[in-house]
Image: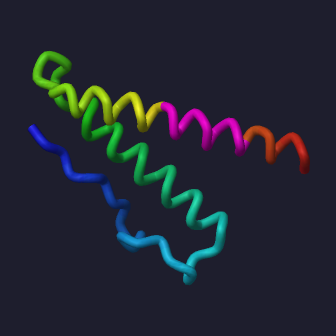
Amino acid sequence: MTVPPFEPPGVPRELGPGLSDDAQVFARIENLMGEEDALLRIPARERTAHDRERLRLIGEELDRAFEKLRERADVT
């Protein structure tokens, strides 16, 4: 089963210059979390190797994003 990337309502497919940096980061995180949720809804035994790899990559990217946010919060 192939799952299309999640797109939150009101967030453009391409995050362009019209959004602030904070809005772009938030939209990217929301997109990743939605995609992760969609992939996790596939029963584990039915996930393809591609699905499992995508889940791993999403997890790594979210970990990096949240670490940057924690660092940012410590600075302010």
* Residue 68 spot, x, y in % from top left: 71, 43
| Image quarter of the N terminus | top left
| Residue 50, image quadrant | top left
Q: Residue at x 41, y 72 (%)?
A: 14
* Residue 13 spot, x, y in % from top left: 36, 70
In this view, the residue in front, 55 or 29, is 55
| Residue 11, image quadrant | bottom left
Q: Is residue 69 left or right of residue 52?
A: right
Up-down relation of residue 34 to residue 26 (above or below): above
Q: Residue at x 80, y 40 (%)?
A: 71
In this view, the residue in front, 50 or 74, is 50
Q: Is residue 60 left or right of residue 67?
A: left
Q: Residue at x 11, y 23 (%)?
A: 46
**Outermost residue to the bottom:** 18
**Outermost residue to the right:** 76
* Residue 57 spot, x, y in % from top left: 42, 35
* Magenta stretch in the rendered image: 60-69
Up-down relation of residue 13 to residue 39 (above or below): below
Q: Residue at x 42, y 43 (%)?
A: 33
Q: Tell me the chief SS of the magenta region.
A: helix
Task: Give the colour scheme shown.
Answer: rainbow
Q: Is residue 64 magenta?
A: yes
| Residue 55, image quadrant | top left
Q: Is residue 1 magenta?
A: no
Up-down relation of residue 11 to residue 25 (above or below): below
